[in-house]
Image (spheres, rainbow, N blue to C red):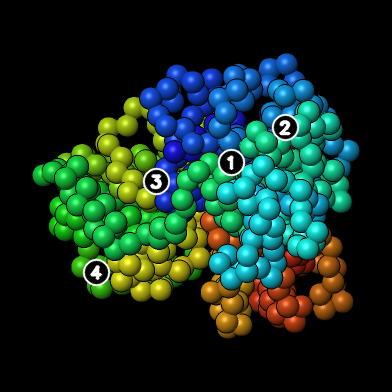
């Protein structure tokens, strides 16, 4: 297997997910427990993850240099590359230019790590870009004169520090306009460092680079998609672990909770009741639609609890996003626990998926980015046990599971909607009045996007009540009104995403409709920030 040493990156688990996709076993360990935890495993290779720390600081996380004497291939990603440089005698410094987002990587030297990474080259269709440097023949690392080295591939960066000097034995194999050591290799010892993240989908040939590393480790990667049998086994597992107990589920109507609840419903039928809490933070028409789909079509027992007043009261006067998220999480769980008691339920189903876990500081060295109500907002002394069938999956995998369960596209491909709802799309205190504004604006945005046929290409699209008032002019009178921001993003697994380059005419149409139909709004702006550094939701 390949061991992934976790220095606290938001995307460490994504590395293991990518390797799972190509049937490579992995284990994620903390740096301080590497030797102890892996002594009984056959280690074919080690990946050092990224992380929020700075390697040159005295309290920085590191790894015992013995790792590099074990004679196994090592790949350092981002912070991982910096760790390699620091430990083996190179150096790392704060970069003068920081890179967050896309960059062009120029491959300047052939390496087995970059096999099949040519924009026009497909695996199996053309020979590797330099057969003399293929993993079967790793003594020769010089590019052959007849093979053209690819010019550049686009990669995803997320760093402020950079390698300043490489250790002995290493050479640069890739550069960007900003950094000279974007990719480094000691081919003899099979130690590689890359400043970009191959695990995120925005890195072109990212999966290929991980496959290449697996091959360098002597493993045989092969594609392994999620299958029907795999899901059936999960459903049987749910049935076994629940036994004769009653189960309730937190159903929000979003993709994750819908699919998690439907899996449990398939497993135990009427032993399961889905609870939908109307928090008053939902969008127009949502409650009615949910009732139609789940009780009428799927014959699931659905209980609708009206808790609007409780949420609004608890949010009174609260402006800090983390506090809002925590209060909403706590209110959800209070209501759910009350319902669980009524149903005598032992288990509570939640549609938690992996990005919720990791963003809520779900691994030891990861930083808390935002508290997802279903993870970071949970009280310590919960009376019910959690059942989270999707906890290890990413959204696109959840959608695949839904499709294999033959759920309609209206369920599997709904745009994600956050648990805390519109509360985190209102900057500052949540009030009925602001909710009413953002609800009306949101409907316009979504309707126009649907009319333009863009639902399938966008990951999410929504409006934000920014709380900034600006001066306008209406009917020759001075107006002083709200600023609405529109956010539309493309993503695959939400660990990274791009803002969508929407057509100007469409944006204009949306903007004109907003300022004419929602007269409280004076101004409309478009959010052109990628993740990282911006998260998808504003709060
Ligand atoms: N904290 C380090 C930097 O900013 C590494 C970042 C990372 O691993 N994503 O360079």
| Residue at x 58%, y 41% (from the top left corner) | 10
The furthest residue to the top: 58
The numbered mark, 4 or 1, whose residue comes first in the sequence reads 1
Please tell me whether mark 2 sits on a helix, a strand or a loop: helix
Q: Assess mark 1: CB under 8 A from ligand 1? A: yes
Please tell me whether mark 1 sits on a helix, a strand or a loop: loop
Please tell me whether mark 4 sits on a helix, a strand or a loop: loop
| Residue at x 62%, y 47% (from the top left corner) | 137
- Vertically, is 410 above or below 338? below
The numbered mark, 2 or 3, whose residue comes first in the sequence reads 2
Question: Mark 4 near mark 2, Cβ–Cβ under 8 Å?
Answer: no
Q: Which residue corresponds to mark 3?
A: 391
- Vertically, is 220 above or below 191? below
Residue 82: give its label.
Answer: 2
**Is 452 placed left or right of 281 in the picture?**
right
Observer-nearest residue: 523 or 459?
A: 459
Give the CA distance from mark 3 to mark 1. Answer: 15 Å
The numbered mark, 4 or 2, whose residue comes first in the sequence reads 2
Q: Which residue corresponds to mark 4?
A: 298
Give the CA distance from mark 4 to mark 1. Answer: 36 Å
- Vertically, is 38 above or below 133? above
Q: Assess mark 2: CB under 8 A from ligand 1? A: yes
């Amino acid at each position: 297997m390949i061991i992934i040493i976790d220095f606290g990156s938001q995307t460490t688990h994504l590395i293991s997910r990518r390797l799972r996709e190509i049937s490579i076993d992995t284990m994620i360990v903390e740096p301080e427990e590497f030797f102890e935890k892996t002594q009984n495993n056959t280690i074919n290779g080690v990946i050092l993850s990224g992380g929020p720390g700075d390697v040159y600081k005295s309290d920085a996380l590191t790894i015992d240099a013995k790792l590099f004497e074990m004679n196994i291939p090592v790949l350092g990603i981002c912070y991982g590359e910096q760790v390699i440089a620091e430990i083996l005698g190179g150096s790392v410094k704060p970069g003068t230019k920081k890179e967050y987002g896309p960059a062009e990587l120029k491959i300047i030297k052939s390496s087995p790590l970059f096999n099949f990474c040519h924009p026009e080259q497909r695996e199996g269709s053309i020979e590797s870009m330099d057969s003399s440097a293929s993993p079967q023949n790793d003594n020769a690392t010089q590019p052959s004169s007849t093979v053209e080295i690819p010019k550049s591939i686009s990669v995803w960066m997320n760093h402020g520090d950079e390698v300043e000097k490489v250790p002995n034995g290493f050479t640069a194999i890739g550069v960007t306009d900003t950094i000279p050591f974007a990719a480094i290799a000691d081919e003899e010892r099979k130690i590689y460092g890359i400043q970009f993240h191959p695990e995120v989908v925005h890195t072109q040939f990212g999966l290929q680079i991980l496959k290449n590393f697996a091959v360098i480790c002597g493993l045989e990667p092969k594609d392994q998609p999620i299958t029907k049998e795999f899901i059936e086994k999960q459903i049987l597992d749910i049935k076994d672990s629940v036994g004769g107990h009653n189960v309730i589920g937190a159903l929000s109507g979003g993709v994750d909770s819908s699919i998690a609840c439907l899996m449990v419903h398939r497993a135990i039928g009427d032993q399961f009741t889905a609870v939908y809490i109307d928090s008053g933070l939902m969008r127009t028409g949502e409650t009615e639609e949910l009732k139609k789909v789940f009780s009428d079509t799927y014959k699931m027992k659905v209980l609708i609890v009206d808790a609007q007043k409780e949420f609004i009261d608890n949010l009174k006067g609260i402006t800090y996003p983390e506090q809002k998220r925590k209060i909403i999480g706590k209110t959800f769980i209070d209501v759910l626990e009350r319902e669980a008691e009524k149903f005598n339920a032992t288990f509570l189903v939640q549609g938690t998926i992996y990005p919720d876990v990791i963003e809520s500081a779900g691994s030891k060295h990861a930083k808390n980015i935002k508290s997802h109500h279903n993870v970071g907002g949970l009280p310590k002394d919960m009376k019910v046990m959690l059942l989270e069938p999707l906890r290890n999956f990413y959204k696109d995998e959840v959608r695949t599971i839904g499709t294999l369960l033959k759920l309609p596209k209206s369920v599997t491909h709904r745009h994600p909607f956050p648990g805390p709802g519109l509360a985190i799309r209102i900057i500052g205190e949540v009030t009925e009045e602001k909710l009413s504004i953002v609800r009306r604006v949101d409907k316009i945005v979504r309707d126009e996007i649907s009319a333009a046929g863009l639902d399938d290409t966008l990951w999410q699209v929504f409006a934000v009540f920014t709380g900034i008032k600006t001066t306008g002019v209406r009917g020759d009178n001075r107006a002083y009104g709200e600023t609405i921001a529109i956010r539309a993003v493309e993503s695959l697994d939400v660990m990274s995403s791009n803002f969508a380059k929407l057509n100007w005419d469409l944006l204009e149409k949306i903007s004109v409709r907003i300022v004419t139909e929602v007269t409280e709004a004076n101004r409309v702006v478009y959010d052109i920030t990628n993740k990282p550094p911006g998260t998808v939701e504003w709060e």
